[in-house]
Amino acid sequence: MTTAETKKVKKVGDAVLKYTRVSPVTNIFISGLFIILALLCLMPALLVLIVSFSSENSVLNKGYSYIPLQWSVESYAYLLHQSGYITHSFINSIGITLVGTVIGLVLCSTMGYALSRPNYRLRNFFTWFIFIPMLFSGGLVASYMINTQILGMKNTYAALVFPMCCSSFYIIIMRTFFQTSVPDAIIESAKIDGARQIRIFAQIVLPISLPAIATIGLFYTFAYWNDWMLAMYYLNTNRQDLFPMQYVLINLENNIDFLTRNSQFMTPGENTNLPSETVRMTMVVISVVPIACSYPFFQKYFISGLTIGAVKG
Amino acid sequence: MNKALTQTPRKVVKPKKGDNGGSTGSSFDDVELFLLHLPTTIWFLIFCYAPMFGVVIAFMNYKLAPGHSFLYSLFINSRFSGLGNFRFLFNNPDFSIMLRNTIVYNLIFIVLGVVIPVTLAILISQMYSKKLAKVCQTMMFLPHFLSWVVIGYFVYAFLATDKGLFNRVFTSLGIGEPKHQWYGDVPFWRWFLVFLSQWKGMGYGMVVYLASISGIDGELYEAALIDGASKWKQTKYITIPLLRPIMSIMLILAVGSVFRSDFGLFYQATRNDGRLVSITNTIDVFVYKALLVNSNINISSSSSFLQSVCGCIMVIVANLAVKKIDPEAGLF
């Protein structure tokens, strides 16, 4: 089709669109509604951001406000200065997210690939094997007892990574992707050339499956970055060296002293001039910024993940 | 890529033992594939299947034997108590409250979780400016990516008694009592919990349905237009019927988790405030508190077990029901 023809078709399409669409008044109404909803989702984040840039005095006098009496970066400066503890939790979060995402991707993609091979004799068995946990789980208490009492994962990094590094749902997404987007002919011909399955998987299937890997990788990245439950279950409050950021936030909720009092990174007497009100919100901002800045760009992968995910199990 | 592979001269490989040429699958292939997913299999055995057997804790009167292993404590030191734990659980005054909270809130969430996103998806697909629609969609997606801990802080910035925005604004306008204790206001939170859950989930839900709407063939609407169908009729007779499969899948998933509550919403967003316990005590909160705050293994394991069993039954029943109405729509 030439460009001129495409243009023509597009024009006809536009003309039809004109008749099928809603009236201009309705459009204004709908647009207004969505602008309000979008602001409703954004304004709370903005408030926290503004508070983090307010001076401590402003918050003490005026409360949390969109228009502070005085702008300031004192809380950021404070966190940067006594950063031992905060930096540590930041590094913990990054490390857990990276390791968890990589392990999760390896576990899900290998199983997804095996289940996507039509000739695999154990295919049916293992499809059920991963499907049953979607229906029935042992529940929190059984998992907790096994993870802490038998695997000895209390107060370890392992407890923050392994319990959530694989999921039947992601495996099914992967399997469906491999089934629909990786041509059988490629795998067959590689096999005839004498390639082993592991090599086929690593050198042929994975490189052409980057969209699926990216999607699932993103799911994992956000899940690990945002996770606080595992820390809450498996970490004792005196093991701050293991805390991810989200768990630090939980502990800051009730006592800002937590930053200084319990910390083994602090030297005594350093907690003077603690801008406690703004520091909390600054911590929130620091934990949200990586997500808020990245998700608009990755949104399309997320959406594609949702749509390939919406398939029968 | 395909072409290159077919053009390269193929090496003649000697058929290995048990290898029948590769095209119809060989036991060799099976072994390799099995080894490839062995780590995943082990993960499932440890983290999914072992806890399934761990449910026996629910039927034991668990007694810790200091200095001995967990299995010794469980099978030798503890007595089999049959349904004793469950009897104890049912007699607990909190039990009916948490069951009520869990189920009632979930029913509200299930209904709203379909109605609101579908409505929004249909509306946003009608917007003239695709750019504005995209921007709004992106902004509405934000809460989905935030953890409940962070949202708890957002809420706190508005509701804090001293410094919260609500109290400051209302006081300056002269409405309501000054220094209102929002975190003790049960009637307010009863509906605010619903609002919060929908606020966090609407962007995500909208995107799911929007993806299906944009997959609908435009010619259907053109045909309807020629037949003189109004926009409302087009929505009613084309869009919604075509959204039914995805709606039923989302519904099965939601009904299947009717005994699960969003721990983050009920525990973190409310800052675990003691004054709100009558509405925030759901099964997951109860299990968490019983296990990690009160260390009562018996009662937490029995409620956790009940939750799993009921959840399993609900998924199967919901799937059957949906299949009965529409044989194509089931999840499995």
Image (tube, rainbow, N blue to C red):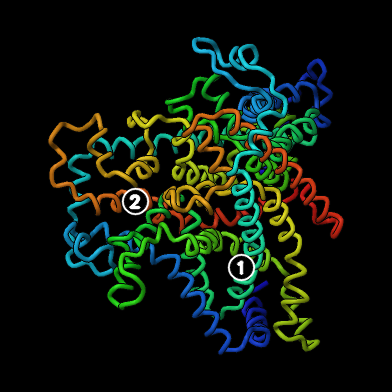
Q: Amino acid at mark 1?
A: Ile
Do circles 1 and 2 both sit on a common chain?
no
Residue B151 lies, in percent from the top left, at: 43, 55
Return the residue nearer the eye: B192 or B174.
Answer: B174
A247 left or right of A67 in image? right
**Quarter location, residue A104:** top right
Disc 2 target residue: A284
* Residue B8 seen in this snapshot: no
Asked if B168 appears above or below A291 in the picture, the reply is below
User: Badge 2 local density, few (<14 within 10 Å), some, or many (20+)?
Assistant: many
Q: Amino acid at mark 2?
A: Val
Disc 1 target residue: B116
B104 left or right of B276 in image? right
Mark 1–mark 2 distance (CA, rounded to whole Å): 29 Å
Asked if A176 appears above or below B177 in the picture, the reply is above
The disc label shown at residue A132, or none: none
Q: Residue at x 70, y 45 (%)?
A: A176
Return the residue nearer the eye: B252 or A98.
Answer: B252
Q: Residue at x 28, y 66 (%)?
A: A65
Which part of the image, by quadrant, shows the N terminus of chain B?
top right
Return the residue nearer the eye: A139 or A191.
Answer: A139
B277 left or right of B212 in image? left
Residue B62 lies, in percent from the top left, at: 60, 21
* Residue A35 seen in this snapshot: yes
